[in-house]
């Protein structure tokens, strides 16, 4: 009888361990998928920027410094390889895109240009998609990290060397603001 109880307890612990491990694997895959989803929208914005810069160049040739900073920020995004590098370079790109809006405010003809308006509308839509993707990513990371820190699943997490995932966070107050897209004078 004692042997049966020991075997049942061992079986329950084994099933729990396998289930917990598989939960960590699912969580890890969900975080990767969430990051990839966010990356798709970041790439979409990345591809939209050259068109926006070229449109502004036609109207504001003497704003070369502003346009160069946008191009440099875009290149930094392209060179980023890790999630933390991507997060940092994306923050810089968001800041640089704000300067495009400031330039547009100074040129009413540019603001009235149909191509510019379409690009800004696309940019606004992409920014919304990026925000939603970041929320989804952070939700997946939160779920994974809570499981990793919670007892008794933390035992399995540490046994198999699962590590905390990095949340997407914006470090400065200026970067926390949305990119302003405005067609009003």
Image: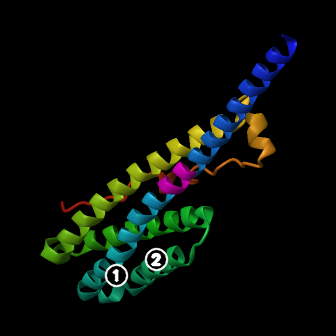
Q: Quadrant of the N terminus?
A: top right
Res. 172 image quadrant: bottom right
- The residue at the point 33 percent across, 68 percent down is 102
Q: Quadrant of the C terminus?
A: bottom left
Indicate the position of residue 146 as horizontal and vertical percent values: 64, 35
Specify the segment rendered in magenta: 29-34
- The residue at the point 52 percent across, 49 percent down is 30
- The residue at the point 54 percent across, 77 percent down is 76
Depth check: 130 or 107 in front? 130
> Which residue matches tag 2?
74
Q: Is residue 179 magenta?
A: no
Query: On the rendered structure, is 72 left or right of 8?
Result: left
Magenta highlight: main SS = helix
Q: Which mark is residue 71?
A: none
When the figure is inspected, residue 62 is found, relative to residue 108, above or below; the finding is below
Mark 2: secondary structure = helix
Please say if the residues under marks 2 and 1 sit with CB atoms less than 8 Å apart: yes
- The residue at the point 69 percent across, 47 percent down is 164
Indicate the position of residue 150 as horizontal and vertical percent values: 70, 30
Query: On the rendered structure, is 108 left or right of 3?
Result: left
Query: On the rendered structure, is 166 left or right of 3?
Result: left
Indicate the position of residue 136 as horizontal and vertical percent values: 45, 46
> Which residue matches tag 1?
50
């Amino acid at each position: 009888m004692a042997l049966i109880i020991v075997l049942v307890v061992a079986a329950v612990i084994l099933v729990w361990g396998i289930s917990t491990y598989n939960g960590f694997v699912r969580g890890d895959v969900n975080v990767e998928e969430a990051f990839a989803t966010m990356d798709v929208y970041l790439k979409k914005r990345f591809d939209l920027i050259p068109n926006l810069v070229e449109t502004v160049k036609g109207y504001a040739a003497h704003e070369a410094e502003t346009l160069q900073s946008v191009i440099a920020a875009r290149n930094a995004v392209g060179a980023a390889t890790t999630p933390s590098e991507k997060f940092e370079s994306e923050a810089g790109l968001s800041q640089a895109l704000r300067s495009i809006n400031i330039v547009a405010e100074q040129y009413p003809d540019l603001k009235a240009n149909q191509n510019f308006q379409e690009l800004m509308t696309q940019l606004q839509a992409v920014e919304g998609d990026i925000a939603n993707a970041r929320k989804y990513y952070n939700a997946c990371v939160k779920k994974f990290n809570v499981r990793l820190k919670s007892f008794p699943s933390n035992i399995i997490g540490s046994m198999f060397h699962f590590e905390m995932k990095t949340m997407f966070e914006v470090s400065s107050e200026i970067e926390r603001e949305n990119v302003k897209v405005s067609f009003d004078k």
